[in-house]
Image: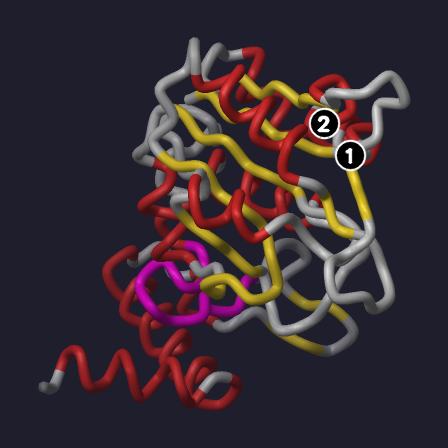
């Protein structure tokens, strides 16, 4: 998979993309990530990328010409499956969307900044708009990193244990069951006996029940959705 990220503050992206799972994915040649400075596509000598909004009001807006120049330049060589704009008013990101995007080959992520980007870029070039939650950040760089991390860990071969991602919370619509490790007794609290039994079938049955109980308690909305899908 190849992911390109377009940002006017690219320095915010470098460290997370070069450590841990994302670094290993690139070392395994399963992922290519390229960060592009929007200012490199500016059409004036000052490398400006923003301007005041028409109609007045506070804040600045990323202007259309440098964004269009960047998208057109990158698209000449890369056939993007999706051009994604990270924005608070986009579709709320979830595991289902992460699964769908993990099957793509080439993605271009646009990290907005200031008050956002010129609407005409959204209308003409953007194919998907995604939000990571109902709140506002200073820019789209952190949401872009969230997308990259969530998507890449689903690519076969990225995780050492390929079944690990399949048991994550939300993968089957439920929260993951509680996890335990050594010691078996910690400050008087014991690991559930079933997990020490070695009976894998009973352990999986316990995990499912624990997952259902946890989801019903913490996320009743997810529990009811799961319940309805199995009992239409």
As for residue 170 lying within the magenta part, the answer is yes
Q: How was this image coloured?
A: secondary structure
Which element is circle 1 on? loop
Badge 2 vs badge 1, beta-carbon distance below 8 Å: yes
Dividing the picture into quadrants, the one containing residue 83 is top left
* Mark 2 closeness class: few <14, some 14–19, many ≥20 residues within 10 Å: many
On the image, the x and y values in percent for residue 39 come to: 78, 24
- Single out the residue that lies furthest toward the left: 232
Q: Residue at x 34, y 68 (%)?
A: 173
Magenta segment, which residues? Answer: 168-179
- Label 1 packing within 10 angstroms: few (<14), some (14-19), many (20+): many
Look at discs 2 and 1 and give the one toward the viewer: 1
Task: Determine the secondary structure under disc 2.
Answer: helix
Residue drawn where x is 39% and y is 44% of the image: 127
Location of residue 98 with respect to 226 vertically, above or below? above
Query: Closest to the observer: 52 or 25?
Result: 52
Quadrant containing the N terminus in the rendered view: top left
Question: Residue 189 placed where, x, y %?
Answer: 68, 77
Q: Quickly name the residue at label 1.
A: 49
Numbered badge on residue 38:
2
Residue 70: % across, % down: 60, 23
Query: Residue at horizontal 81%, vertical 20%?
Result: 44
């Amino acid at each position: 998979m190849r992911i390109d990220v377009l940002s006017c503050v690219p320095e915010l992206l470098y460290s997370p993309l070069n450590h841990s799972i994302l670094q290993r994915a690139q070392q395994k040649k399963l992922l290519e990530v390229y960060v592009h400075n929007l200012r490199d596509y500016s059409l004036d000598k000052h490398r400006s990328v923003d301007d005041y909004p028409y109609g007045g009001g506070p804040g600045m807006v990323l202007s259309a010409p440098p964004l269009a120049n960047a998208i057109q330049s990158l698209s000449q060589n890369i056939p993007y499956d999706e051009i994604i704009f990270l924005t608070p008013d986009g579709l709320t990101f979830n595991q289902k969307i992460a699964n769908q995007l993990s099957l793509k080959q080439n993605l271009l992520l646009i990290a907005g900044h200031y008050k956002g980007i010129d609407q005409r870029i959204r209308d003409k070039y953007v194919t998907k708009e995604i939000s990571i939650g109902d709140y506002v950040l200073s820019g789209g760089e952190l949401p872009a990193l969230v997308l990259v991390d969530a998507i890449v860990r689903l690519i076969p071969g990225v995780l050492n244990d390929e079944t690990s991602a399949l048991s994550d919370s939300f993968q089957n619509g439920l929260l993951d069951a509680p996890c335990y490790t050594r010691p078996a007794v910690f400050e008087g609290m014991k690991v559930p006996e079933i997990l020490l039994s070695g009976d894998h079938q009973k352990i999986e049955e316990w995990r499912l029940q624990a997952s259902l109980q946890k989801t019903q308690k913490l996320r009743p909305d997810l529990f009811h959705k799961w319940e309805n899908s199995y009992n239409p």
